[in-house]
Image (spheres, rainbow, N blue to C red):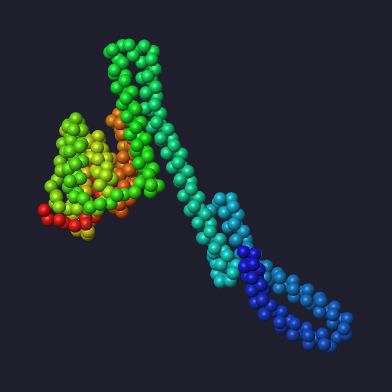
Amino acid sequence: MRKNLFSAISLRTASISSLVIAPTISILMWYISGLGSFEALLLFVLLFAIVFTITYSVSAYLHNSRLNKMTRIIKNVSNKQFEDYDDIVVENNDELDELIRQSIRASKMVEKELIRLNKIENYRKEFIGDISHELKTPIFAIQGFIETLLNGAVHDDEVNEVFLHKAMKNVNRLTYLTKDLMEISRLETGELKSNMQEMFLRDVVLDVVENLQYKAEEENIELVVHDFDKNIQIRADRNQIKQVLINLVENAIKYNKDNGKVEIGMKDLGNGKVEMFVKDTGIGIDTNDIERVTERFFRVDKSRSRERGGTGLGLSIVKHIIEAHGEKLTIESKPDEGSVFRFTLTPVSHVSV
């Protein structure tokens, strides 16, 4: 950087020299030739000092404003203060101007990186706070039930079994939470590899619906599978796509209204993609929350989620799986009108049966 700076100053000084010093020297040489040696030397030194002072002053005037601009940028970066620098206009194209441009670009890059790191740090703090809260609730509940039993309730046949069932419910919640945390961690780090294979999409859908039919009946929710081509095949990880559908259908049942309905279907987009959708008649999602529902531990209805055993990680896992397959997840929802979750898949062939 110092080398470039000296090069810029030398270049500008050389330009000044060609305009000022050369003609001056020519005049001096003509005048000095008519003087004695001592007077000529004295005059030469005096005039050289004058010319040097003039040259230095002009050079400093031309460079100081730009050096001050660079100093301002560098000080701001070191103090973590960033500006737009719209007032800095670079008109010339020498080395010093290039250094100013690079300094402005470096300032912007450092600013973006600091913003990114701050977001990561805030996300880490929020995540630690969320998971601490999620773990604390069932742990304290289990502790309370066990202490009550140890204090004599274990001998009371009317309450001991009830308390044990409640403790077991919270143990299961911890198990689900731990499992989901391990799953999402493996997805994010790429440790969980997708076992890609060809499969009939309708078979996967019917398998999921059959497994969740009892939950729908318990909640008095109607599960409806729209008819679509049974011969459509996709290439994907069967277990992961099945998990996506399970999470979406379970959420549609959990957040539905009494006597509600959940619809599962497929649409051919005509661009080499098919689109699966899970539609419900549930409580819906506020417009401001739609972008956040795939975040870890985010819940639309926190009290209802905890009551039903939700970990707040299901949709985050769905998003990671869909993106790992190179597909897209979209969400449409209105409060009190229901939600539609859609995700694309890529068919590989149509086999006649």
**35 to 73, vertically: above or below:** below
Location of residue 329 in the rendering, given as x and y in whole percent from the top left corner:
28, 49
Figure disc tally: 0
For the point 38% across and 15% down, the residue is 150
Which of the image's four quarters has the N terminus?
bottom right
For the point 45% across and 46% down, the residue is 119
Location of residue 306 in the rendering, given as x and y in whole percent from the top left corner:
32, 30
Which residue sits furthest left?
353
Task: Please indicate whether residue 277 sits to the left or right of residue 171 in the image.
Answer: left
**306 to 235, vertically: above or below:** above
Closer to us: 140 or 336: 140
Task: Please indicate whether residue 325 sits to the left or right of residue 81 in the image.
Answer: left
Location of residue 235 in the rendering, given as x and y in whole percent from the top left corner:
24, 53
Task: Please indicate whether residue 105 sits to the left or right of residue 351 in the image.
Answer: right
Examine the rendering and report whether any part of residue 145 can be seen: yes
For the point 25% across and 40% down, the residue is 246
Examine the rendering and report whether any part of residue 290 can be seen: no
Closer to us: 284 or 124: 124
For the point 31% across and 42% down, the residue is 315
Q: Quadrant of residue 46?
A: bottom right
Q: Quadrant of residue 272?
A: bottom left
Location of residue 260 in the rendering, given as x and y in whole percent from the top left corner:
18, 35
Closer to us: 6 or 30: 6
Task: Please indicate whether residue 79 sits to the left or right of residue 322 in the image.
Answer: right
